[in-house]
Image (tube, rainbow, N blue to C red):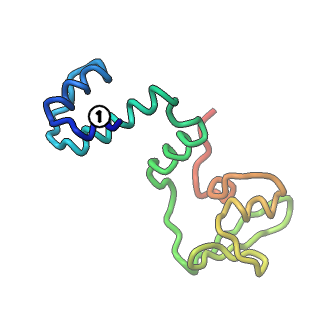
Amino acid sequence: MIALEGMDVAALRKRWSEVYIQPPPSMRSPYLLRLLLAWRIQTQAFGGLDAATRRTVLSKAKPHVGPKLSAGTRITREWRGRTHDVEVIEGGFLYSDRRFASLSEVAREITGVRWNGPRFFGLRKAKAA
């Protein structure tokens, strides 16, 4: 890793070909080449991201699906014969005079088990079987 600091672009490109076993990208930034090489060398030595971290990163990369809810919107769901009303507020949701950070938390409060909140309230289509 320390050796990377002293390398010029040509040396970094040569090292890239050794580490990645393919030609380097066309970028000319030694800083980016060093970062990417350092990442690759570390993952080869110590392993990459664990499964949970990969899922978290990928979930953050997914585009928002479903309607965007603005403060004041009311969502209603009937569950086991009872109607549940939720109000969208700034930074969360109001249900039974209690504040929740997510619809999933509200769904869990209602059902007692984990749910995907938007799916529970019908804001997202269920995946096809």
Report the residue at 76% width, 52% height from top: 114
Residue 100 in picture, x, y percent from top left: 69, 71
Residue labelled with disc 1: 3
Circle 1 SS class: helix
What is the quadrant of the C terminus in the image? top right
Residue 99 in picture, x, y percent from top left: 71, 76
What is the quadrant of the N terminus in the image? top left
Residue 71 in picture, x, y percent from top left: 55, 78
Above or below for 64 versus 89: above
Which of 67 and 81 lies nearest the eye of the viewer? 67
Residue 68 in picture, x, y percent from top left: 49, 65
Q: Does 81 sit left or right of 64 as displayed?
A: right
Q: Quadrant of residue 37?
A: top left
Q: Does 16 sit left or right of 87 as displayed?
A: left
Q: Does 31 sit left or right of 99 as displayed?
A: left
Above or below for 8 versus 117: above
Report the residue at 57% width, 75% height from top: 91
The amino acid on which the numbered mark 1 sits, given as a three-letter code, is Ala
Report the residue at 28% width, 20% height from top: 18
**How many numbered marks have been drawn onto this rendered protein structure?**
1
Q: Few, some or many C-alpha atoms within 10 Å of disc 1 (few <14, some 14-19, many ≥20)?
A: few
Which of 67 and 99 lies nearest the eye of the viewer? 99
Above or below for 76 versus 25: below
Which of 99 and 6 lies nearest the eye of the viewer? 6
Q: Does 99 sit left or right of 89 as displayed?
A: right
Q: Quadrant of residue 118?
A: bottom right
Which of 57 and 43 lies nearest the eye of the viewer? 43
